[in-house]
Amino acid sequence: MIGISKLYCGAVEASDALRYGRQSGKLPSHLLQFSKDKKPVVVWNMTRRCNLKCVHCYAKALEEQGEDPIPTAEAKAMIDDLAAYGAPVMLFSGGEPLVRKDLVELAHHAVGKGMRAVISTNGTLITKAKAKELKGVGLSYVGISLDGGEEVHDRFRGVPGAYRKALEGVENCQAEGLKVGLRFTVNKRNVAEVPKIFSVLRELEVPRVCFYHLVYSGRGSELMKEDLDHTETRALLDLIMDETRALFDDGKPKEVLTVDNHADGPYVWMRLLREDPKRAAEVFELLSFNEGNNSGRGIGCISWDGQVHADQFWRNHTFGNVRERPFSQIWDDPNIELLAKLKDKKQHVKGRCATCRFLDICAGNFRARAEAYHGDIWAEDPACYLTDAEIKR
């Protein structure tokens, strides 16, 4: 996760993170990526069920009706373990988390145990009444997915009217005073829609947006050939920086982040070297705090069936099951070879990653993409768009 507004527009300084000792339990949410203890943010895909049929769903979601393997009481015990372990954030995802009738009860339980609760949703089920319920939970954030304007979004989501329902969800959250933001997964089919997303930020006064680079998993693996090429990705990052700067210059600052490609950090830094060398030095320090990709270290995932993974996209490797053993015990088990290696993946990456001068601030980027593309967990990430000259030590 790379904070474009934090880094490029100077919304965060290194001193802001240092003031809290960089401990995840003390840092406010917007600084959490700079923690030094890297207690994992845990994504719980609490259901595989969904009311939409998205073409890029990493969970390969199923129809809305059905049962979920982990019942409410068992889920609360899982949350108790995560809270005692020190996981600072629990992200309730799916499928579509709002199809579970106990979402509000479980999110409330997490908050009551001292965790920050976040929901990742398609937004279409957030009625006025549901928004009021969610406000009562004390959620830290609601992230609602958009794939572009109405025509493109509805095509991606496989259900007519999904766009309008999602925007209604945004407005219902705002009416209750919930912090709400947008999530946008970029590929060749919708990259031209990025300016429309910034228009929504302005028009609806949405405070936050995350632009996700495509990860080749689930139904998203079928879009691998539609990922942006390196030239297109560089143009995307420049556009996002330009649009973010324009918001700040207009007195409408927003929190803008890119997710799932840690080459973005060095790219922002190199642009600042040309534009503002003093700020570039500050940004490099913040990037060193961030430490790059944290799959299997600063982020973990629990699937709908209790399986534990390094992140929500990389499901072909399982480390254990919370229905048989607590997450805390699984996560710290040195005998799980791949999980142990992911805690210090810089020693194991190959190819361009192994000799890259930015390895300490990128950590080899996404292993899920490397494996999907090369068939080798430790190969270089094919989505790294930095040139050989740029990464040379």
Image (tube, rainbow, N blue to C red):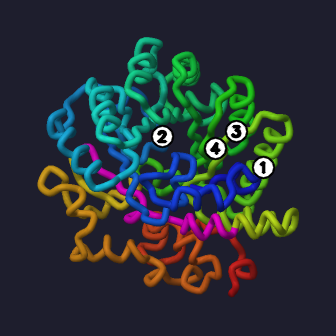
> How many angstroms separate mark 4 from mark 2 (CA)?
11 Å
User: Which residue type does callout 1 highlight?
Assistant: Leu
Q: Are marks 2 and 1 in contact (CB under 8 Å)?
A: no
Judge by depth and name the residue closer to the eye, 313 or 132: 132
Give the labeled residue for mark 4.
189
State how many labels appear: 4
Task: Tell me which label, 2 or 1, sits earlier in the chain.
Answer: 2
User: Which residue type does callout 3 highlight?
Assistant: Lys
Report the residue at 82% width, 67% height from top: 278
> How many angstroms separate mark 3 from mark 1 (CA)?
15 Å
Task: Tell me which label, 4 or 1, sits earlier in the chain.
Answer: 4
Residue 136 within the segment the image draws in magenta: no
Task: Tell me which label, 3 or 4, sits earlier in the chain.
Answer: 4
> How many angstroms separate mark 3 from mark 2 (CA)?
29 Å
Give the labeled residue for mark 1.
239
Give the labeled residue for mark 2.
55
Q: Are marks 3 and 4 in contact (CB under 8 Å)?
A: no
Report the residue at 69% width, 31% height from top: 201
Give the labeled residue for mark 3.
254
> How many angstroms separate mark 3 from mark 4 (CA)?
25 Å
